[in-house]
Amino acid sequence: MEEKMSISQYIYMASDAKFSKKRCLPTKGIVCLVIGVLLLVLCFAVCKGDALKMTLLSLGAILAVAGLIWVAVCCGKDNGKIIYLPTGACMKSCKRYLDANDVMTCRNAVENGDLSALESVRFAASSNAQIHVMISKDDACALVQVLEYVPHDFMPSTRVWELSGSDVVRLRAWLNKK
């Protein structure tokens, strides 16, 4: 199987600047952490009453831990969102396992850009092939690709197919069927 470009590579290699990755900034987490630490310091430095001290201690600890978690999540590996620039909509990733009997049909449909053939493909609970779709929340754009399991990971087996307009609505309806 020849080396195919994945959807994420396609997004970053797009020459017409249709997609952008928006990074999550940890400012809210840092503010929450700083306020929590200040409350903890204030608790030990100023408070003399037990009830007020326990309230500030609890509130400061909760804010500090929440701030740490927020910063960790924002600085994580996959913290960015893919944005479809023409409409400013966020792209959502969706993967579905394909029925073993329909893998070739699905692969041919994606390679040939045939949405009606794709709509006849059924999903399975588990399989060695899956369809990966990145679809904008406003149904303006969708990227479709078939992945097949090669030991240890799912690898692209088709090109990336870009859909727009009413085809995206039809694709979403097909993805939502049971």
Image (cartoon, rainbow, N blue to C red):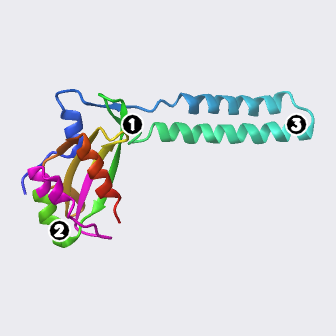
Residue count near mark 1 (Cα–Cα under 10 Å), binned few <14, some 14–19, many ≥20? some
The residue that disc 1 covers is: 80
Is 27 colored magenta in this rendering?
A: no
Rendered image quadrant of residue 152:
bottom left
Q: Is residue 27 above or below residue 91?
A: above
Which secondary structure, mark 3? Answer: helix
Which secondary structure, mark 1? Answer: loop
Q: In the displayed image of the protein, which residue is found farthest to the bottom?
A: 101
Marks 3, 1: nearer the viewer: 1
Which residue is at a point 27% across and 51% down the rendered structure image? 170
Residue 172 in the image: x percent, y percent?
31, 51
Which residue is at a point 56% across and 42% down the rendered structure image? 69
Q: CA distance from mark 1 to mark 2?
A: 33 Å
Label located before the other in sequence (3 or 1): 3
Label located before the other in sequence (1 or 2): 1
Rendered image quadrant of residue 46:
top right
Quick check: 86 left or right of 27?
A: left
Q: Is residue 131 above or below residue 35?
A: below
The magenta segment is 109-132
What amino acid is labelled 3 in the image? Leu
Report the front residue among 21 and 167. Answer: 167
Residue count near mark 2 (Cα–Cα under 10 Å), binned few <14, some 14–19, many ≥20? some
The residue that disc 3 covers is: 52
Quick check: 59 left or right of 124?
A: right
Q: In the displayed image of the protein, which residue is found farthest to the right?
A: 49
The residue that disc 2 covers is: 102
